[in-house]
Image: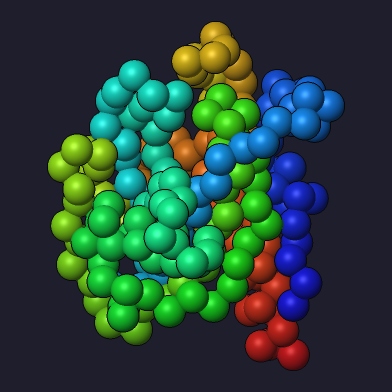
Amino acid sequence: MPLPGFEAQLKMAAVERLEELQRVSLLKKTPRKAAVMMLIYPVNDVAHFVLIERMVSKGAHSGQIAFPGGRQEEEDQDDAVTAIRETHEEVGIIPDHQEIIAAGTPIYIPPSNYMVSPFLAFAKAELQFTPQPSEVKSIIEVPLHELIDPNNVSKHTLSTSYATNITVPCYNLQDHVVWGATAMMLAEFKTMLQKSLSLKDV
C-alpha cells in the first residue's frame, strides 16, 4: 500500500519542529544517515513492539525513548542493513530474527542533523533482549494495542537540549512519554497497520 507519509507523521509533530524543518530546507544541509527498527513480535500470543530508553549523555537525544537504531556505517549496503545491524547491536536480536516487511518515510532530525529511515519488521518467535550497556538504559516492551488505543495520545510539556517548556503531542506507552521523531514514525506505522487491518476485514 502507499505510505501514509509526512501527513501521518505531522499528527505527532510539534509546531516548533515544523518551523525548524522549514528553516532546514532553506539551508539545504547535508544530513548524516541513520536507520531505526519497529520490530513486532509475540509475547504469549499478543503482538508487542520494542522501544529503548537511551542512556543519559551529552547528546541531543539523551535519555529519550526511541526505536533501536543508529547511524549508517561505511560497510552498510543500504538503510535496511543499518536498521538490522543496529537492532542487533542495541538490543541483541540477531538479523535472522528480523524480517523487514516495509520501509517508512524518512524523517529529518534537526538537533542532530540526521536523516533517519524507519523500518517495520516482524519476528515470528518470542524474543529475549540483551541491551547494549553503553547506550541502552532499559528495554520497553509495548503491546501493540496500546499504540492503536486513541486514549494513549496526549500532550506533554517538557524541556530539551534545544528548547524549554514546549508542549508536544505524545504517546503514553508503558508509563513512558514517547514524543518527537519516534512519535512521528509511530504515527505513520500506526496508520499503516490500521489500514492493513481494515483491508483484511473487507
Q: Taking the image as drawn, is residue 191 in sight?
A: yes
**In the image, what residue occupies the spot 44% across and 62% down?**
76
Looking at the picture, does residue 129 appear above or below residue 183? below
Residue 60 at what x, y percent from top left? 45, 24
Residue 149, located in which quarter of the rendered image?
bottom right
Image quadrant where one finds the N terminus: bottom right
Image quadrant where one finds the C terminus: bottom right
Q: Is residue 64 left or right of residue 119?
A: left
Residue 98, located in which quarter of the rendered image?
bottom left
Q: Is residue 138 left or right of residue 202?
A: left
User: Residue 188 versus residue 99: which sits nearer the camera?
Assistant: 99
**In the image, what residue occupies the spot 25% across and 39% down?**
135
Q: Taking the image as drawn, is residue 49 in sight?
A: no
Looking at the picture, does residue 114 appear above or below residue 140? above
In the rendered image, the residue lying farthest to the top is: 164
Residue 168 at what x, y percent from top left? 61, 27
Residue 96, located in which quarter of the rendered image?
bottom left
